[in-house]
Image (cartoon, helix red, strand yellow):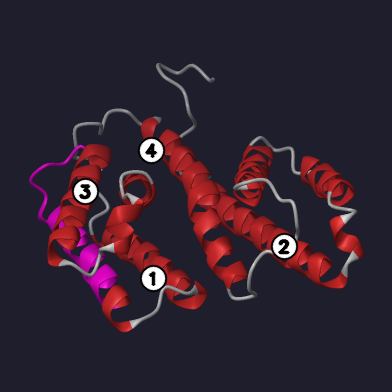
Amino acid sequence: MPETLAALFLAHVLADYVFQSSAMVDTKSKPETLFLHFLIVLLTAMATTGQVASPAIYALALVHVTIDAIKVTAFSDKFLPHLSDQALHLLTLAIFAKATPDIYATGAYGDLSWLPKLMLYAAGLIYVTRAGGFAVGKLMAGFGANPIEESLDKGGFWIGLLERGLIFLLLIGNMAGGIGFLVAAKSVLRFEATQDGKKAEWVIIGTLASFGWALAVTLAVMFVGAQLPDLGIAGQTP
């Protein structure tokens, strides 16, 4: 089961956060966009599992776009609906992996026991950084415009991307103590902004949300990863 879950998780991340453009997100209520997204979900699932004719893969893609269609037609694009949408997608992956645990093992890569862990780590890094950026951005949008003047264009985006990526790598690399230095460094660099009450609250909320997302996702990835064979090819440890 964990091998299949890792492969399906990577497919989900690629479909939603790598191959889905901003234009597709903005026009997802259109049938042609939903169909295109269905094809992307289907093809990424085929690519990561090594399965082409499995009915479960087609069913998963259909459920994925159904969740998306309900979300765009019945709910707003704010933080809680977005979070609920992702929670449903991840729950769907878990259900399909539980119901059809041999999808990966019977696929084209079934003999590569090390590959699912690599897939899991790659998906986790993308989900921590890219998906975290969207989630934190939607959360902060509820508090109004950025109150910090003279910010770089997309400066907050890149800061969040880098800090979440570093947290992921530090935890995966068993160097959790480095997160404390990351917090301290950001506190020092943001010291001037935190002299103003509104700016301080903005920075604190955004930082805690970003760190919280990174920690939660990385710990979940580590939990699944602990059930997978170690990385390495032909018995060699990287």
Q: Residues within 10 Å of mark 4 (few under 14, many from 20)?
A: many
Mark 2 vs 1: CB contact within 8 A: no
Where disc 4 sits, the SS reads helix
Where disc 2 sits, the SS reads helix
> Is residue 60 positioned above or below 74 on the image?
above
- In the image, the segment drawn in magenta is 50-70
Q: Earlier in the sequence, mark 1 or mark 3?
A: 3
Where disc 1 sits, the SS reads helix
> Is residue 196 positioned above or below 166 on the image?
below
Q: Earlier in the sequence, mark 2 or mark 3?
A: 3
Q: Which residue is under mark 3?
A: 40
Q: Nearer the viewer, residue 136 or 123?
A: 136
Q: Earlier in the sequence, mark 2 or mark 4?
A: 4
In magenta stretch: residue 59 = yes
User: Percent x, y for residue 100?
Assistant: 23, 56
> How far is the residue under mark 2 from the one under mark 4?
31 Å
In magenta stretch: residue 181 = no
